Image: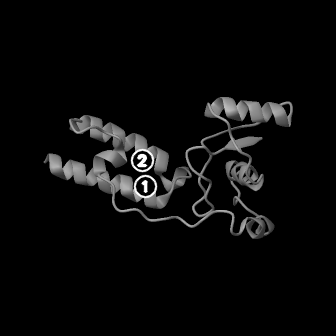
Amino acid sequence: MWAAWWSGPPTRVPFRKPDASHGGSASREAAWAEAEAAAGRTLHEIDWRWARGWNRILRGQDPFSPADLRALDGVVAPKTRRGPRPPREVLGVGKDASLDEVKAAFRKRAFETHPDRGGDPEEFREVHEAYERLVAKAR
């Protein structure tokens, strides 16, 4: 199985799911080629425990064993907090987006970021707050 993160590094808490993953390649080289084709760019190898962590999540398990956690300590830098982003940027809608377009964008982003689907709770809250602000502004 391979797993690839190219839009940002993997994170432990909450576990950031990969941008793409797949299993069943005939060789390590074939898996690498498949991952780079999915990314559309050259990838750099990271610790294999991240792919195994994703595989464990897919099987309904915790992503890391205690030994994995010890091995990964210090691998990922802590999250940096940026200032609040404009709600339209958070939802990915333009200045002239209709309320229906805002609702559709919210549903899409909520699906992508919801913690029950492996998303980041903080990012999900940001998406929800952006939606609430835009809906309130439309009324």
Q: Look at 25% across and 35% down and name the residue there.
A: 100
Query: Could you say which is closer to the camera, residue 76 or residue 129?
Result: 76
Q: Tag 1: Cα neighbours inside 10 Å, few (<14), some, or many (≥20)?
A: some
Query: Could you say which is closer to the camera, residue 139 or residue 15?
Result: 15
Q: Look at 23% across and 39% down and name the residue there.
A: 95
Q: Tag 2: Cα neighbours inside 10 Å, few (<14), some, or many (≥20)?
A: many
Name the quadrant of the N terminus. top right
Q: Look at 37% across and 57% down and name the residue there.
A: 126
Kind of residue indicated by mark 1: Phe
Tag on residue 55?
A: none
Secondary structure at badge 1 equals helix
Residue designated by label 1: 124
Secondary structure at badge 2 equals helix
Q: Is residue 138 visible?
A: yes
Q: Look at 69% across and 63% down and name the residue there.
A: 75
Q: Residue 22: image x %, image y %?
A: 71, 36
- Give the number of marks: 2
Query: Could you say which is closer to the camera, residue 11 or residue 100?
Result: 11
Q: Mark 2 near mark 1, Cβ–Cβ under 8 Å?
A: yes
Kind of residue indicated by mark 2: Ala
The answer to whether residue 94 is left or right of residue 36 is left
Q: Earlier in the sequence, mark 2 or mark 1?
A: 2
The answer to whether residue 25 is left or right of residue 103 is right
Q: Which colour scheme is used?
A: one colour
The answer to whether residue 107 is left or right of residue 22 is left
- Distance Cα–Cα, label 2 vs label 1: 6 Å
In terms of image quadrants, where is residue 31?
A: top right
Q: Is residue 24 visible?
A: no
Q: Residue 102: image x %, image y %?
A: 28, 40
In terms of image quadrants, where is residue 70?
A: bottom right
Tag on residue 110?
A: 2
